[in-house]
Image: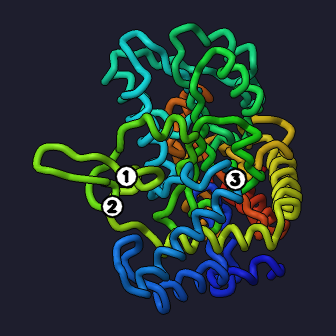
Amino acid sequence: MNQYKNYFPIMRHNKNLAYLDNAATTQKPDMVIDAIADYYKQKNANPLRGLYELSQKATDAYENARKKIAAFINAPKEQEIIYTRNASESLNIIAYCLSDLLLKPDDEILISIMEHHSNMIPWQQAAKRHNAKLIYLYPDKNGCITTDELKSKLSAKTKILSLTHVSNVLGTMQNIKELIAIAHSNNTVVSVDGAQAIPHAKIDVDKLDCDFYSFSGHKMYAPMGIGILYGKQTYLEKMPPFLTGGEMIDYVDEQTATFAELPYKFEAGTQNVGGAVGLAAAIDFMQSISYDTIIKRETALSESAGNQLSRLPYVTIYGDKDYTKHHGVIAFNIEGVHPHDVASLMDAGDVAIRGGHHCAQPLMRYLKCNFCCRASMAFYNDEEDINKLVERVKYIRSYFHGAQ
């Protein structure tokens, strides 16, 4: 077992497992699990409410995590960091509240055909509520939205562009900074779904100049149930609250209420402090490994998996032919074998991958397949995992169609 897997207790207890479903969720290192356990053992109380020492410790843990997260993505202000349950909730907040602020009938929203359903359905609903139009961008053969494609779809009516940073199926990273600049020149507000980008690349929201950036903790070694919505203060202050209730209010009387300042306006109810502490610990963990190491290892693994699988004549790989640009994701099909059968037989051989539509059904149809297999790597994977994947592909093909 390599030194990196040794940081993860689930790897120590499953030494034969090649876990290649990291785009769905990553495993959690000791450092994160211990931080969460220590919080519940030593500091647990309801934050922001109690006037006693333990509640203050919980509040400090909650707000210190926010400071760390703001620094991690270089957000100009801590108030611009909103805790959510996951990227899906962050994207729903933006779609619901921003559309109320910006959209009028016949206005236009731009998204891409590559979006995860979490960054598609909220905009479908927003368009219906406001009688606006949802317009799609389509990628080139390498899985990227070109500047020409964006310029051809922008108009005076385009109020919002919401785009994935890294596709959860193709693994391709968009030239998001350039696309944002073009959209801003059209006075279009830009939201970025960074759920699949932040585990694989250093994010600087200030340099990107995005108006919103969303991600989940569980895809970057933190626990499930904690996510982040970054938004520029100028928009967050104007947007109406999404959920209402405890802690997000300033003053309430029988018929009306005023709301708390940022970030609390968007954080109704008791919050997931343990999750925030776990996310802060995950940031410490990733920084201890370093993005240079993470990117180097994941790039090499993507290239190896892509090159080996592409030599098999019955395998189709989707996305860029330069597999170093896949950011740990290789989506593929085996001719004549359903992806669900592939995933099941992979599991029988201690290889965990995902088979299905990957919450991207319009993209599947655009790729002319209803389902595909997805092997997704993290830095803790190694060449032995890739070799097991490739050998299992050969076995599965021969199981259904005989030796090739």
Give above or below for 111 relative to 290.
Answer: above
Residue that carries the numbered disc 3 in the rendered image: 73
Residue that carries the numbered disc 2 in the rendered image: 247
Q: Position of residue 391 (x, y in %)?
A: 77, 62
- What type is the residue that disc 1 sits on? Ala
Quadrant for residue 382, please give it: bottom right
Residue 341 visible within the image:
no
Mark pair 2, 3: CA separation: 26 Å
- What type is the residue that disc 3 sits on? Ile
Quadrant for residue 128, please give it: top left
Label 3 neighbourhood size at 10 Å, few (<14), some (14-19), many (20+)?
A: some
Horizontal side of 287 relative to 114 (left or right) equals right
Residue 359 is marked as none
Give above or below for 132 relative to 310.
Answer: above
Q: What element does badge 2 sit on? A: loop
Q: What element does badge 1 sit on? A: loop
Does label 1 or label 2 sit earlier along the sequence? Answer: 2
Q: What element does badge 3 sit on? A: loop
Please identify, in this view, whether the residue under mark 1 or under mark 2 is nearer the observer: 1
Please identify, in this view, whether the residue under mark 2 or under mark 3 is nearer the observer: 2
Residue that carries the numbered disc 1 in the rendered image: 260
Residue visible at 61% across and 42% down in the picture: 336
Residue visible at 49% across and 91% down in the picture: 42
Mark pair 1, 3: CA separation: 24 Å
